[in-house]
Every structure is written in C-alpha cells, then in structure tokens.
Image (cartoon, grey):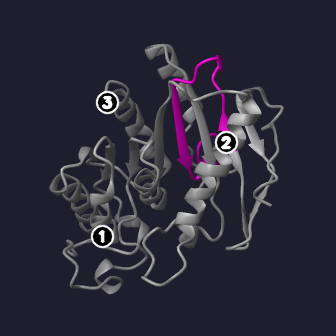
Amino acid sequence: MIDDINFTKYSKNKIFKNLYKSNEIFDEEIKDINQIIFRIPKDLTKIDNLILCYDGQNLFDSSTSHYGTIFDLESLINSFEDQVKKNFLIISVTSNSKRQFQYNPYLTEGDKNFAEDHIENIVLKFIPSVKNFLGINFDQTKFIVAGASMGGLMSIKTSILYPEFENIISLSPAFWFGYPGILNDIKNLGSNSTTYLYTGKKEGHIFGDHVKNIFPKNRDLDFSNNDNFYFSGVKNVNDSFELNKKNVKFFIDENGLHNETSWASAMPEIFLNLLNN
C-alpha cells in the first residue's frame, strides 16, 4: 500500500553507503510496484538541493539497470558537492513493466492519466515519507526534477503540476507519446521555471523500423531518417519553450545516443549551468 512506506539501507556494500531504499510500493491502479531509492548527503542539517529523479533503477547500481548502463550519479554528485560546497539529497523512484502508462502524461483524451496520479503520489506521499524518515526540512532548498526519455516528459509535467520544482532536467524526452500534447502543455509551465533540455543527434537507433512506417506522416517532423526524426522532435519541444517565452537552455550532443552513458556525459555541463542560475 502507498501509505505503508518503510526504509532500510540499500546494501551492505560500502559503495552504496549513502543509499536507502523503500519496501516495494504496490500501485493499485496499474497493478505493479515502484520503489523509492534515495541518496543522502553527509550533512542533513541543511538541504541545499533536492533532485527528484525518475527511473531510479538506472542511477546508481548497474545490477538493477534495465540495460546495464547507469548514470553513476553518486560519483557525479560527490564531485559537485566538493566543487560548489552545497549538498544534494536525491530522491528517485523506480519504474516498472507498466512504464508506458505510468510515465506518459499525454494519453489520448478520455483515457485514465496514470502519470499524473503517479506524480501526485511522488510529490505528496513519497517525498514527505523520506523527509519524515530523515527528520529534515526544505526551508532553503532548491527543487530540481530530472528524467530521461519518458522520464523527460515526466520531469516537465512534474513542474507544471507542482511549480516548486522550478529547475527541470529533461534528457531526450520521448516526445512522440501523445504528440503534440507536450508542445501544447509547455505554456502551462510557471514563469520562474528553467528547463535544461538535452538531445543527441544519434538517438534514432531506438526505433525498430524506419519512423516513416511507425508515425503519422502529417506531423511536422523530419522523416528523412530515424536520427533526424528524433532530433527534430526535441527541437520542436525547444521551439515551443521559446515560443511560449519559457526559460530553456538547449544542449545538443552531435554523437549522443539514447542511453545512460550519453546522458551521464551531458550532466556535468547541465549541473554547472543549473547551479549558477
């Protein structure tokens, strides 16, 4: 049950000494489970930065990663804590076999929006459960939300629903889910939000067929090849931010693939921009 959340140390392995995990949390609506994994800083007396991350199984531990690659977020965050002298609490939520429903805020009109319900549970139940467990407050905390692919959609939608998450990291958002819903939704972001949007130019490998055989041809996208299709979609997302006068910083990797290795390599520059904002 969602209301029955308990935490234990993630592992006895010393490389995971900063990590905790919840019990398995059963989602009654989609009939599958999620789990909270959170990373604590050395000093809990003042939390400078809270990062809410989607797809938590891909952040720290290669044995739980869906594809064997991870962000190695602990190493990255450790270096930034030393560099900027500010600490980071990372609260992540794992995804599951129903990810295409739970991580898609742009379903066809009339369908049940499991993604919005999931975001509500995370913000109103999961994060407070960690806060209470640690006995901390967020009085002077910068709120950041981050996700990749479908998680990139969720990071933007989280800020729309809960504007206190003013800092958004959206890595290679899976724009084609409910397209052009995300383009139309960007206008609903708060005026104080800043989005750090990333895409690689070689991400078309994720499609098993040529995109012209998969997606409607009437969409304003580049169907010349799969890589161009992916890039054109994320560029349209960036254009929508600019058209709606929302703060956005667009990061493009000429050789970037659709995986944690490419996303992790983009994070140092994104973090430098975010922390100096």
**Mark 3 Cα within 10 Å, few/some/many (few <14, many 20+)?**
few
Q: For this view, does 11 lie left or right of residue 153?
A: right
**Mark 1 Cα within 10 Å, few/some/many (few <14, many 20+)?**
many
The residue identified by callout 2 is 128
Query: Is there any visible trace of residue 73 in the rendered image?
Result: yes
Q: Disc 2 versus disc 3: distance between alpha carbons? A: 28 Å
Q: Residue at x 59, y 43 (%)?
A: 59
The residue tagged with tag 3: helix, strand or loop? helix
Instruction: Determine whether 274 is above or below 146 in the image.
Output: above
Type of amino acid under label 2: Pro
Q: Position of residue 170 (x, y in %)?
A: 39, 50
The residue identified by callout 3 is 273
Q: Residue at x 28, y 67 (%)?
A: 184
Q: On the rendered image, what quadrant is the C terminus found in?
A: top left
Labels 2, 3: front one: 2
Q: Earlier in the sequence, mark 1 or mark 3?
A: 1
Q: For this view, does 259 lie left or right of residue 12?
A: left
Reply yes or no: does residue 54 show up in magenta: yes
The magenta span reads 37-60
Type of amino acid under label 3: Asn
The residue identified by callout 1 is 226
Instruction: Determine whether 34 is above or below 277 in the image.
Output: below
Snapshot quadrant of residue 3: bottom right
Reply yes or no: does residue 84 show up in magenta: no
Q: Earlier in the sequence, mark 2 or mark 3?
A: 2
